[in-house]
Image: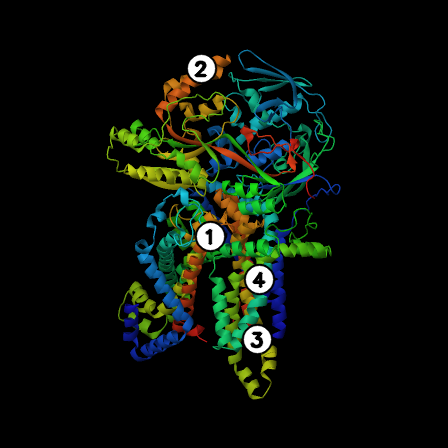
Amino acid sequence: MAEMSQTLTTATPSPRLENLRRGVYRFRRNPLSMVGLVMLVLVIIIAFIAPAIVPYPEDAEGNVRALDRLKPPDGEFYFGTDNVGRDIFSRTLMGTGLALQVGVVIIVLATSIGVTLGGVAGYFGGWIDDLLMRITDIFLTVPALILAIAVTAALGKGITNVMIGIALVWWPGFARLTRSLVLSLREEPFVEAARGIGAGHLRVLFRHILPNIASPIIVKMSTDFGFAVLTAAALGFIGLGAQPPTPEWGAMINDGRDYFPDRWWMATFPGMAIFLMVFSWNLLGDGLRDLLDPRARR
Amino acid sequence: MILRVYLLRRLVLVIPLLLGLSLLTFTVSRILPGDPVGLAAGPQATQEIREALARQFGLDQPLPVQYLNYIGGLFQGDWGQSLYSRRLVLDDLRVFFPATLELTIAAVLIATVVGVPAGFLSAVYRDKLPDQVVRIIALFFVSFPAFWLAMIFQSILGVTLDWFPISKRFDVLLAPPPAVTGMITVDALLKLDFNAFGIALSHLATPALVLSFGSLASVTRITRAAVLEALDRDSVRMERALGIPYRVILTKYVLRGTLIAILTIVALEFGWLMAGAVLVETIFDFPGLGLYAVESSLRLDFEPIMGITILYGIVFSLINIATDVAYGIIDPRIRYG
Amino acid sequence: MKGSIPMRRLFRLTLLLLAVSALVFSIMPGSIRMAWAQDSENILLYGGNQDIDNIDPATGENYSINAALLSLYDALFIVRGENLEPNLVDTWEVSDDATVFTFNLKQNARFHDGSPVNAEAVVYSFNRMMTLEGPPTYRWAGIAGPDAAVVVDEFTVQFTLTQPFAPFLGTLSQLYIVNPAIVEANRGDDFGQTYLRTTSAGSGPFIQGRWEIGNLYEFVAVADYWGGWREEGRLDGYLWLIQRDAQTQLNSLLARETHVADTPSGEDIARIEEDAGLSVAQNFGYFVNTLKFNTQGEYTSDINVRRAIAHAMNYDALPEVLDIPVEVMPGPTPLNFPGAVEGLDVPTFDLDLAREYLAQSPWPEGGITIDYVYVAEFTREEIPGLVLLEGLAELNITLNMIPMLWPDMVASCATPESGPDMINIYTQPAYLDMDAHLYNQYHSGQWGSFTSCSFYSNPEVDSLLDAARVEGDAAARTELYNQAQTLIAADQPSVWMYAESSLMAFNDCVKGFVYRPLESLSLLFRDIYMESCPA
């Protein structure tokens, strides 16, 4: 972020800075985005301090307490215990870091693949563009969830495969977006100028064009983050996700499904956790869109 | 007519796309580290039984041959066979697709009926309280994991309140109306059997409601944006200046001007909801594509998975073409090309 | 406004495209539905956890398929309780060397189309079964070919095996007899498989009614079934409702929307029993959960490591933490299985002893990681791992829990190199003979199948098991099996954990259930009747 805004300011200093300042002002005036930001900061803090603050950190690693099975929430177990006696409060909080990590890996992977392919396609055009876009189209023919299920089932169960599987079906959106943005800048004078002074293609693409199209991509990253977390949880729920006893929220809900609604706490709390994380990302993404994507600003 | 040529061209272009898709899913399904044949042959199978099964399904052939056989079959209406149940994939799709289609249509209807007025309200009261409330509600619902919400709604509406049946598509003790479309509500209406229609509808209610939440936010957002754009148009400003009542402008000009955008988003959401149905169907034991997809993927039963993917591909492509055509019609400056 | 005409066109186009996409795939074949015969009849509603994927006797094999086949078809023998009873067979003879089996069939048995179930039909069915080499044929692999059965006369059939196999009669309860005329009429190019996987051609007490794939299946009683019915309360039919969700099964049973719920969870037993009109049939069966060591593996080839691990398992905790009643069974055979040796020296949960064994291994201080492979999403395989993980942590051994999809597990058992250190496997004998329990798990000739994933090899055990297969004398066989079990127990190729109890929840108005340990989950609907069930 810091580097990007620098590039922005050096390119055309005053109007951009002015824009940014106005954006930040708008962002701070939008109570929802502020709520989202605060919630997200809390989530990140929890992810880091969870191991230190939860009462039973060992419950995230396959501890079995036969005598404490299926206890409803009380003063000792705030969220109750699951079918092998593990503290759900501890497991839910310990799962925060994993969910964040899953989201980050998916989004970073998908963005890298998508921006690179989309950028190359848009910049070079011609047959490269045709080829890359046809490949992108193939991925876009099928809803991401369906393809993610197929790919993850093929790769085999496990949280790493879930991340790879989802990232592999998530990049085409970024590729499309990047391509259209690059196309709109390809003939701009500053690009011509950079090329004129002898900059290589890749340098032009990555040093001159990409910094100028970062905003919409960042907006997409933030709005997609929540959905990536949701998709990962869905795969966990279906049974393609994390390896037990990993406290993965989707898998925890699946564990709780057979006990719902009689022992509602097993599925309810991990579900609330997913909701809170996704909701805070969506609020933030909504605010960021207002801030960074002028076309969507209304 | 140009439109007709364009349409034909787009439809023809779907074929290489689907070929690519089939190659993709084929590759994915054959890099399986697991042993689908071993699973299908059953726990006690000897090596000979497994080999016989592989032979029967042509899995002993080299991969390119397998792929060509598969593609050849696709064009002749042979979509392969489930290794596990040995049923024909196309037969299964014929049974399960109408169920999912029915569920999706119901969900899209709910999302539209709720989302469009909400978006409208949001735009008219832009940045005021109703706008904020609508926005937060829409974001709220889209942030829930659908499968989790499905569990909650099933137990509230189905068990606690006992308003709706908790699972399946129809009363198990009754034979559903004769299948014409496979969508029970439609079939019931075709027979003018309103009792059956009511039963089918009550089974559809909870899953469709839960499924619609996923689209509420985008339908609302797009409607809001489209209405704001229409309100911004010079013609509308002019009409306001001319003193035409605001309400008349809204209903007569703005709503009509935004219909296309709404239609477009609804068509797109249709495709996404069909995917979302996967998660909702599992909870409600709703025998559709989603249940089929999940069961097949857990069994590594790849022929059904490929069939489902390609079917989704076809439906999605058709929807995309429809929306692209729609864009062209709204804005004559866009040339079909 | 400019939009009006193009808009209408657009509308039409969109609708058209949607309609086309809908139509192309929703042309459903007009299914023939059996109308409900009369009102107020005895229709049993069965909440089944599993689909009935396929009803071809030659290719289908699991508990739900078997329940359906038992209803639609007849076999030569039938398992009632723990006994094997003749069904289509009237009398039979076995040659002294247990290779030639001659059966005289009952002459009144009729297929649903009225034709007699004769020797030709038996020969045809066996030939079809063995030619297709489907999953059920493992019972006869290596002992009989497709031509093993021949017609002697209209109602006499003879099987000649390629090697002696004393337990042969027991396997014939799974040889369902198909109607050759119907199969031939629908033979196609796949020996009638396309036809038979959704349509039956049998002689059983039920025929198919509504058949909604993935949803529900209706079985309608054949009023004049050749085998006869009991007079009072027999079923007029039953509906197999697929209820994949355990909670749905429970709720439906409690709400009196179903009469039976199969495989209820152990957690729900109390809840069901609380209800005055419902009860759960609980029976310990032969469904056994075992952790198999790879006896050719890096660490687990060492007997002391195996013994140390076997002593680090908290056996007594298992019944506490599992969601189903179990009987702990730290030896190779369930104690209620005929021929199980009593008083074997089997491990107990004893960490001190475990440390002693570990001290004699090349890794006296532990510090090793053992892979534990189990079926993903199956908590009853996950939980024993978690219990063992706790015990092993005390020995400084790390247990790496690896959930796998079932086919991956099967694949990993192909060779000792790919076999995991430990794997959680459920086994169930296919017939009521010690051979079914020991041969496939502990004979070195069976390597490659998942039941022998411990890659156990002991030439002495091999020769004992081979000898028992041809031994005609019952007492001598028992002695051979006793020796084999003792040797196997001493080698500790597995951590034997428990036999699971089989659960089936009933409304009390459903009568006639007799527990059948061999096919514990497949209800014998022909013997079920109802007494004043609420409508």
Rounded to the nearest angstrom, the CA distance separating label 2 from label 4 is: 71 Å
Tag 3: amino acid: Gly
Q: Which mark is residue A267?
A: 1
Which quadrant is home to the N terminus of chain C?
A: bottom right
Residue placed under numbered mark 3 in the picture: B257
Q: Residues within 10 Å of mark 4 (few under 14, many from 20)?
A: many
Q: Are marks 3 and 4 in contact (CB under 8 Å)?
A: no
User: Relative to C215, is C103 above or below?
Assistant: above
Q: The residue tagged with tag 3: helix, strand or loop? A: helix
Q: Is residue B148 left or right of residue C296?
A: right
Real-space Cα distance between discs 1 and 4?
A: 28 Å
Q: Quadrant of the C terminus of chain C?
A: top right
Q: Position of residue B93 (x, y in %)?
A: 58, 48
Q: Are marks 3 and 4 on the same chain?
A: yes
What amino acid is found at the position of numbered circle 1 in the picture?
Ala
- Three-letter amino acid code at disc 2? Glu
Residue C29 against residue A282 in the figure, above or below: above
Q: CA distance from mark 3 to mark 4?
A: 21 Å
Could you give the CA–CA distance between mark 1 and mark 2, rounded to whole angstroms? 53 Å
**Residue C497 image offset from top left, x and y in percent:** 41, 32
Query: In the image, residue B32 lies at what x, y percent?
Result: 43, 42
